[in-house]
Amino acid sequence: MRDIVHALADPGGQVVALHPEAGGTQALIRPPNGMGRFLTLLNRRGVPLVPVGAFEEGKRFHVTFGPALTHGALDGLGDAQSAERAMRVIAALLPARSRGVYADPVFPVS
């Protein structure tokens, strides 16, 4: 994680992709503990957090980019709440069958 933070601080413009819900399934799962804190750290530093929904349908791979979370969007939230907010934004970019544990909307995605 330190390497990621250092890479993103590089004025040369680094891009890092995180897959917080990694699990090898076709549906979202809860990310590991600490992911929300890490996303909050990046968000506080002004790193654009761009949610991406990726899924397969038929023989095609679809990727949908959402708007970046605004600077400070995760401030005041705990680890679980920050992760939940980010995952709900990602879930909104996916078809219902791929939303997994985030299929039931709990709060607005904005």
Image (cartoon, rainbow, N blue to C red):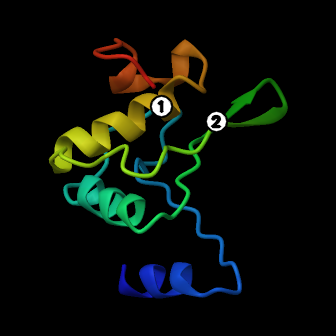
Residue 58 percent coordinates (x, y): 80, 23
Task: Give the labeled residue for mark 1.
Answer: 89
Task: Give the image quarter of residue 44.
Answer: bottom left
Vertical placement of residue 82 versus 95, above or below: below
Taking depth in this image into account, of 38 and 22 the one nearest to the observer is: 38
Find the residue positioned furthest to the right: 59
Taking depth in this image into account, of 96 and 48 the one nearest to the observer is: 48
Taking depth in this image into account, of 2 and 24 the one nearest to the observer is: 2
Residue 35 seen anywhere in this rendered image of the structure: yes
**What's the residue type where badge 2 is placed?**
Gly
- Lower position in the chain sequence, tag 2 or tag 1: 2
**Residue at coordinates 15% horizontally, 47% vertically from top-left?**
78
**What's the residue type where badge 1 is placed?**
Val
Q: In the image, 59: left or right of 53?
A: right
Residue 54 percent coordinates (x, y): 65, 38
**Residue at coordinates 49% horizontally, 47% vertically from top-left?**
24
